[in-house]
Image (cartoon, helix red, strand yellow):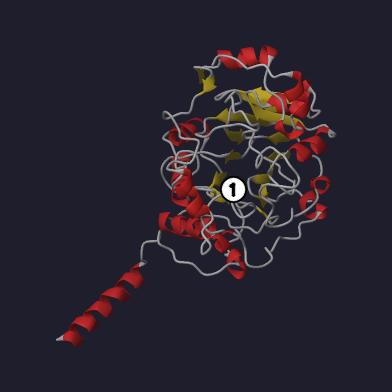
Amino acid sequence: MTGLRSQSPGLSVLRPAAFGADPGGERMARIRRSPHFKDGVFQNPGGLARTRPSGSALEFAKVFFDKDTRPLRAPSGTVPVHPTTFSDLARPPATGLRLTWMGHSSVLAEMDGHRVLFDPVWGERCSPFPFAGPKRLHPVPLPLAALGPVDVVVISHDHYDHLDMPTIKALAGTDTLFAVPLGVGAHLEHWGVSADRLRELDWHESTRVDGLTLTATPARHFCGRGLRNTQHTLWASWAVAGDEHRIYHSGDTGYFEGFREIGAAHGPFDATMIQIGAYSEFWPDIHMTPAQGVRSHLDLQGGAPGGVLLPIHWGTFNLAPHPWAEPGEWTKDAAEEAGQAVALPRPGQPFEPAGKLPADPWWRAVTQPGAHPWRRPRPEEAAAVVRRDDLDYAADR
């Protein structure tokens, strides 16, 4: 496959607007020139990545629709969304860097006098249809218009839980710029964003927006919105550098060795936003577990704890078989074991990485208690087990 297949006029008429548009013309020619495009598709770092569930469809269905575990994939009560207001965000951050997690992978980053909005999804469902598909587990913390002016919107890839047509259409009516991976600009132009407001980048390419340098960096994932996935739009993580601060957004990615190279070239980072949810043994190549997410942060920081890790891509949509709150619990434990600072804000809760970090496990109030099979026993727990074993042994004798 070396190009796009033509569609009949009838099929084009039936194509939902949310599917977006396929790249063509000079955009497609640029895609073909990319060193990361081969045999008609974009290639992943680290070799072939499985993009479909491994094993049989029956095995996957048994896990996904299991009547005992399925209820654990949603909160048991109302998620405590932080009541963020326009005035909260109108005050400049005292330290020059503030992050507000809006849920899933949507983050507003205010840094060095500029405002960056990553993967904004304000829609009710991450789906091409308003009546079907994964629905939000909590409301958006505040209306999109209440964010105030945004200098640049950064998109990691074109999946529905990262690129939301209603949100992009609303932002198209502002004067914000858009930084997107190569090929994704076709969707945005289709939805009303003018070409002069697009900064469309291949991996390792950078663009300047006011005082910020944004660099598209590699990720291990895939793309696609329609019934036919042509792999003609790139996926990316992003490094953003200002005058004083540096931040990183992982987008969606499996773990790979390239995090060390990204950190060496663009870090260390004051904060990273790392995907730690929607993982599964059925797709281990394209999403990280929380343990891998913490490991990737350490790689980005040169191999040692540093900066602040903000977990993203969890808590908002039910996209995998694991329990709803497990990513938060696992990340908290893995970060503690590594000695790494982690921020655990409620959706909509602003925080400054150089200030006091939100650390309350807020999800426990709306979820059933679960085991922590990933956590190593703490020293005091291990000592207690040894003492119990000694007492049992003495009793037996």
Residue found 78% across the figure and 55% down from its top: 88
Residue 266 visible somewhere in the drawing: yes
Residue 70 at x, y percent in the picture: 55, 60
**Image quarter (top left, top right, bottom left or bottom right) of the C terminus:** bottom left
**Image quarter (top left, top right, bottom left or bottom right) of the N terminus:** top right
Residue 250 at x, y percent in the picture: 56, 39
Q: Which residue is mark 1?
A: 313
Q: In this rendering, would 86 be left or right of 235?
A: right
Q: For this rendering, which residue is in front, 311 or 74?
A: 74
Q: For this rendering, which residue is in front, 217 or 298?
A: 217
**Position above or below: 18 against 335:** above
Q: In this rendering, would 146 be left or right of 210?
A: right
Which residue type does callout 1 highlight? His
Q: Residues within 10 Å of mark 1 (few under 14, many from 20)?
A: many
Residue 182 at x, y percent in the picture: 62, 23
**Position above or below: 130 against 357:** above
Furthest residue in direction right, as rendered: 173
